[in-house]
Amino acid sequence: MILSAEVLALLFLNTLFAIFGTIAFWIALTIYLKWDFSATTQTQYSLERSSYLGATIIKYILIFKLLLFIYFIFTLDKISNVITGAMCAAGVVDATEIGIFVLLLKLLNIYLFGFWLLMHYRDELSAKREWTQLKFGYYTVIYLFLMAEIVLETKMFMDIDVDKMVSCCGVLYSQSATTYISTLFKIDSKVLVTLFYGLFIALSYVYIVQKRRVYSLLMILFLPVALLSLILFFGTYIYELPTHHCPFCFLQKDYNYVGYLIYILLFVATFYGVSAPWSRNIKLSYAALCAYTAIVSWYVMGYYIANGVWL
């Protein structure tokens, strides 16, 4: 078990989220089952009043959970200093059997939570509350993901043994690794980079011609390609080391914390891109997409300009 100040803060906040999230769940379930905006009954009036309370609780829980994802990554990086063998957050994730699943669940949840906030924003603008029943029904589903994240995150921190030797990122993200991560290196990086820029060009085209649904579908494909190309290709130019493929190290001070900017831009681009058919923020998505592509490309071109060779 590891109980640093950062971990205690996360556990305390998760306890509050679990309590208030459960209260909001019962409100949401009641509204989803009984909501009828056209009715003039006392029950409907009561549901409308409780909907404001439920929506407020849910909104702030999900906003804080989105912001705390960055703090969670920062915490993993911070406590790596006290875990034997760990050099960055990758070692902490590897310190328990469920670490990678917690991270993947958190990645999934930031999109699921973001979609609820987007639905809530649309509902607030609707005079007929057209999204109310849908958003509360949707919350009854993502509540399960919220609770699963809280339980698994707590278990992960409780299971960490600071005296147990873990593998560093140099071992985990290498061809010689004996884990599923090593299978990533079977992918031809040239094909991956070609696909990355091909999707970027395609997204640029459909953005110009305003094909929102096509843009959304292409962005779903772009996300895994962007993550894989970042690990297998672009990351090596950030580190200026062809054998270093860690997706966490460039979150550190040695690399000017550029990883936070890179991941935030990728999230903004993909989140608003996937939601393009019903969101008005497609311009923000495309701007973030261009900024992300420009940053990762600059590291490649900057290295070539400075050294005259490719890695």
Image (spheres, helix red, strand yellow):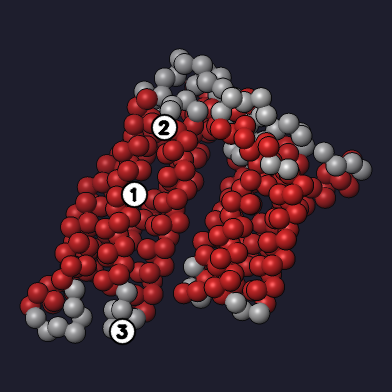
| Left or right of residue 71: residue 144 | left
Q: Which residue is mark 3?
A: 127
Q: Secondary structure at mark 1?
A: helix
Q: Which residue is mark 1?
A: 145
Mark whose residue sits in front, 1 or 3: 1
Where is residue 281 shown, x and y percent of the image? 53, 72
Q: Say few, some or many: other residues with alpha carbon within 10 Å of mark 2 (under 14 / 14 to 19 / 20 or more).
A: some
Residue contact between numbered discs 1 and 3, judged by CB atoms under 8 Å: no
Q: Is residue 28 visible?
A: yes
| Left or right of residue 248: residue 190 | right
Q: Earlier in the sequence, mark 1 or mark 3?
A: 3
Where is residue 130 shown, x and y percent of the image? 31, 79
* Amino acid type shown at disc 2: Ile
* Amino acid type shown at disc 1: Phe
Q: Nearer the viewer, residue 157 or 256?
A: 157
Q: CA distance from mark 3 to mark 2?
A: 45 Å
Residue contact between numbered discs 3 and 2, judged by CB atoms under 8 Å: no
Residue 98 tag number: 2
Q: Is residue 44 shown above or below 12?
A: below
Q: Residue at x 52, y 65 (%)?
A: 274
Q: Residue at x 51, y 16 (%)?
A: 165
Q: Secondary structure at mark 2?
A: loop
Q: Residue at x 52, y 20 (%)?
A: 166
Q: Nearer the viewer, residue 98 or 26?
A: 98
Quarter occupied by residue 129: bottom left
Q: Say few, some or many: other residues with alpha carbon within 10 Å of mark 3 (under 14 / 14 to 19 / 20 or more).
A: few
Where is residue 269 shown, x and y percent of the image? 58, 61
Residue at the right extreme?
308
Q: CA distance from mark 1 to mark 3?
A: 30 Å
